[in-house]
Amino acid sequence: MARAGHYGSGMVTPGKPDDVATFWRRDKASPTGAPGSLGMGVGDRPQVLPRLTSLRAFAALMVFAYHLNANDVLHIPRVINVGYTGVAFFFVLSGFVLTWSTSTSMPKLTFWRNRFARIWPATAVSTIVALLLPIPGLHGENIAGVVLQFLLLQAWVPNVSVALAANGLTWSLSCEAAFYAALPFVLPILIRAPRRKRFALALVYFAAASTVVAVIAFKQPGVTWENVAYFNPALRFGEFLLGVVAALEVRDGYRMSARVAAMLVAVSLIALAATRAYPLPNALLTPLFLAVIVMAAQWDLRRPTGLLTSRPLVYAGGVSFCFYLVHQMTMVNIARWVGHGGAEVALLSFVASCVAAVALHHVVELPFQRLIRGRKSAAASIATHLESNLGTDV
């Protein structure tokens, strides 16, 4: 049974494939133990995956389009009604790329410091800006919500006035913070576990969480439980966990076939056609998102050139985190300033959000990453370089 060796060592213990081979096959073009099979580049540094960075931009656009509808700025096709699932894509992607780019030899405190540097400064600044705008948030300036927002704990409270206070979009960063807290403990366990067991663990956790969400979506026991199904980090962790396990498979030299990827896409689309009971589409589309992420990563390993590897798209993916943070507050305030919605307001909101995202990225996000990690740290500079190319997380 194939087992991963030291994470970041570029080696795999060879063995007989198990039942997981139904979904994953070893890439014969990359021999077991070769750096290419594990995604490891020169000096045991992870090979960059530019397509995953570019895909972040499209996921951010899904959420942007959804909020155009939700905030009555522009009514567009019904398919955008599930645009909020772009966040589920981010969660799967975050699990995949963090696993791909992080060594278990990294001390836990260093990992957490790097994660703090990655998301907190831009999140905090966006919250402060939201509080200064005429419309600070869809649910006002709830004091408890604002305090918990700075602590990245608001998603644990099943109350929209708290979870969505000020810059409401930061609820997803509260989930990410929980994932970051868990990963240094979960990842070594998954690496040591047999492939079949870690695969089963991820599926069982995701299925259990999805079952809870489905019961809430169909039974509709009340808005509090609906908020639990959408915001609660424990229920959203399954999406992240699938990304983690998928990354371990790819790093160990296994590949998802096009047939399996097509099957996952078909299952998601058929399920979505059957029901859109909120917020169940997050779970229903996760197999599709997983297939897209894994196939894009595999394509990067084989052919690191193409449209999704172009500099403009990779840059757009690089600033997508900041775009996500600013887009809703931008559109609701522009709509109020103009006095109506429409295509021109949507376009103006998009352009203004892009400008604000670029500013936040270069003035806050990147400088504070360097400051917190240490300007003279070689590891910090390598990590910053990798994250700008990999799109490490939301």
Image (tube, grey):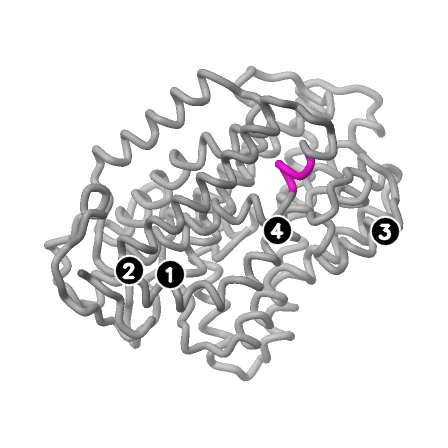
389 or 213: nearer the eye?
Answer: 213
Are discs 3 and 1 less than 8 Å apart at CB?
Answer: no
373 or 339: nearer the eye?
Answer: 373
Looking at the rendered image, the quarter that the N terminus falls into is bottom left
Instruction: Report the amino acid beneath label 4.
Output: Cys
Residue 357 vertical placement versus 251 (above, below):
above
Q: Which residue is mark 4?
A: 175
Instruction: Report the amino acid beneath label 1.
Output: Trp
Residue drawn at x 74%, y 38% is 330
Q: Position of residue 4 (x, y in %)?
A: 26, 66
Residue drawn at x 44%, y 42% is 55
280 or 76: nearer the eye?
Answer: 280
| Label 1 crowd bin: few (<14), some (14–19), many (20+), radius 10 Å | many
Q: Position of residue 121 (x, y in %)?
A: 69, 62
Are discs 2 and 4 less than 8 Å apart at CB?
Answer: no
Instruction: Report the amino acid beneath label 2.
Output: Arg
The span shown in magenta is 227-231
Marks 3 and 1, Cα distance to the nearest angstrom? 36 Å
| Label 2 crowd bin: few (<14), some (14–19), many (20+), radius 10 Å | many
Determine which quarter of the picture holds residue 151. Answer: bottom right
Count of numbered tags: 4
Q: Which residue is mark 3?
A: 144
- Left or right of residue 247, residue 383 in this image: right
Residue drawn at x 38%, y 20% is 270
Q: Which residue is mark 1?
A: 100
The mark nearer the N terminus, 2 or 4, is: 4
Are discs 1 and 2 less than 8 Å apart at CB?
Answer: yes
The mark nearer the N terminus, 4 or 1, is: 1
Marks 2 and 4, Cα distance to the nearest angstrom? 25 Å
Residue 381 vertical placement versus 126 (above, below):
below
